[in-house]
Amino acid sequence: MSEMKLCEAVLGEFLPMTEIPRPSHHEERISKYLFDWAVSRGLHAERDELGEVIIDKPASPGCENVPRLIMQAHMDMVCVAAEGVKFDPLTDGVKAVREGDTLRAEGTSLGADNGIGVAMALCMLKDPDLKHGPLRAVFTVNEEDGMASIGLAPEYLEGGYLINLDWETLGSLCNSCAGGDYFNFYRDCGWESTPKRSVAIELSLSGFLGGHSGVGINLGHANALVSAATALEYLRQNGVSFRLAAFEGGQAKNAIPASARAVITLTVADAQRAMELLDAFKAEFAGAFRDIEPGGIFTASLAGAPERVLSEECGYGLVGLMSAVPNDVFTMSPFVDGLVESSANLGVISIGEERAGFTLFARSSSSYRAEQTGIICKALARAFGFELECEGHVPGWAVNPNSVLTRIACEQYKLLTGKDMVVEPVHAGVECGAFAEKNAQLDMISIGPTLADVHTPNESCDLRSVEITTELLRRIIEAAAGAN
């Protein structure tokens, strides 16, 4: 197949998937779709108890003794919508729009992360002209919000090579990734009636860039939740007393929040002082982010007081803790120029009838820095009267200096494009970390086409890079079949 035909073939597999809702934790329909896809083509397929789909294709004649090559991608997606766009990720599909060589979605994330990877693997499975050894595709669930592939049975990873298709830059190959941990902070709300003769101030932050909390954490984008909390803590530290009535924002644990809203109540006498302080804070904020967040809007306005507020202890504790926890880049790698070593992102907040809290996702390629961040979080939770629940550990993936697959990929990319491939680690979770724990002998790489603004409504996929990446994948598979 020519490059253009390869691209069209990939879109032929990807576009039907955009019609299937597939947010993290709700992959039942896409899992069944992929299983049925394989069975209808006479391929052996299994679904494990998590809903992960494993598809096997026998080796081409003469290649039966070649080590099995596994293609891997995750079927879930981060579902976010632009402000004002009505979108239910549990029931609504994505409306993909093709604009020349770019694919995007109408008002929502596209899901090319990692639907394009799934589609490329399907194309390889159904290609009758592909020469290959034993070929397997593993499609995992819940990668974006907890990396459920940690629970994948080791038997499904029996093989010699694994190509992860969850990379986002053409011409780049990932050979190592950071691990990560989710920290859930929470405490009782203690709702109370709003004090009499109170007025309210509503803070609204919108239009910020947001983005991926791993690969985008070094771009300096404003975290709307942390910014709003810092503004409120600024009021308190300047002598303004208030009660917290509402705080919301963030759409995914691993995405930098692009918007936030908070409501506080206070006395009429304190309201004027608070507005003056907020004007001063907004000026400082604008000075810090004017060139980075040109579309960001930060407003504070008087409003009618709501009927209830959080207890003083809960409200002050929540604001103080949110402004104090590690957020953004923590340390840079001393070994790789420009590589973030450790970071954290406050992704979502939740205030319910009984509990209030938020989730922080910390990443690190250093076990010491990961431990250090955990110690800081535990100490802060205790200091502010919060409970801390640690969940969803994501293992890291170390560099393999003797990787045959890396050498093959670099050689084939050079032959295909005339350019050298960049081999680099990443400050983000890649499922290869979970796989390395289950099969230490797996020779793994991660490749993919160029995606932009993933985990945001501006997500896009460069179609020419899809053409090249798919051809590269095809060549790697064929070269691996003849590599021994």
Image (tube, rainbow, N blue to C red):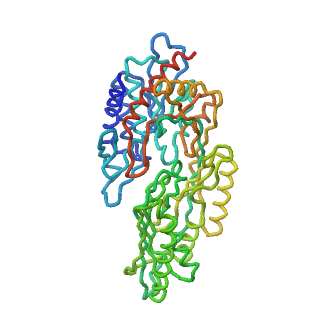
Q: Looking at the image, which residue sits at the far top? A: 62
Q: Can you see residue 49?
A: no
Place of residue 126 in the rendered image (x, y in percent of width and height, measured from the top left): 37, 23
Q: Looking at the image, which residue sits at the far front? A: 418
Q: Nearer the viewer, residue 133 or 415?
A: 415
Q: Can you see residue 116?
A: yes
Residue visible at 32% across and 31% down in the picture: 8
- Say which quarter of the image contains residue 335: top right
Residue visible at 32% across and 60% down in the picture: 84
Q: In the figure, is residue 8 to the left or right of 278?
A: left
Q: In the figure, is residue 11 to the left or right of 236?
A: left
Residue visible at 31% across and 57% down in the picture: 85
Q: In the figure, is residue 387 to the left or right of 455?
A: right
- Say which quarter of the image contains residue 423: top right
Place of residue 208 in the rendered image (x, y in percent of width and height, measured from the top left): 43, 60
Tally of marks: 0
Quadrant of the image containing the C terminus: top right
Look at the picture and state if 454 lies above or below 386: above
Place of residue 462 in the rendered image (x, y in percent of width and height, measured from the top left): 38, 39
Quadrant of the image containing the N terminus: top left
Place of residue 176 in the rendered image (x, y in percent of width and height, measured from the top left): 60, 38
Look at the picture and state if 206 lies above or below 81: below
Q: Nearer the viewer, residue 418 or 250?
A: 418
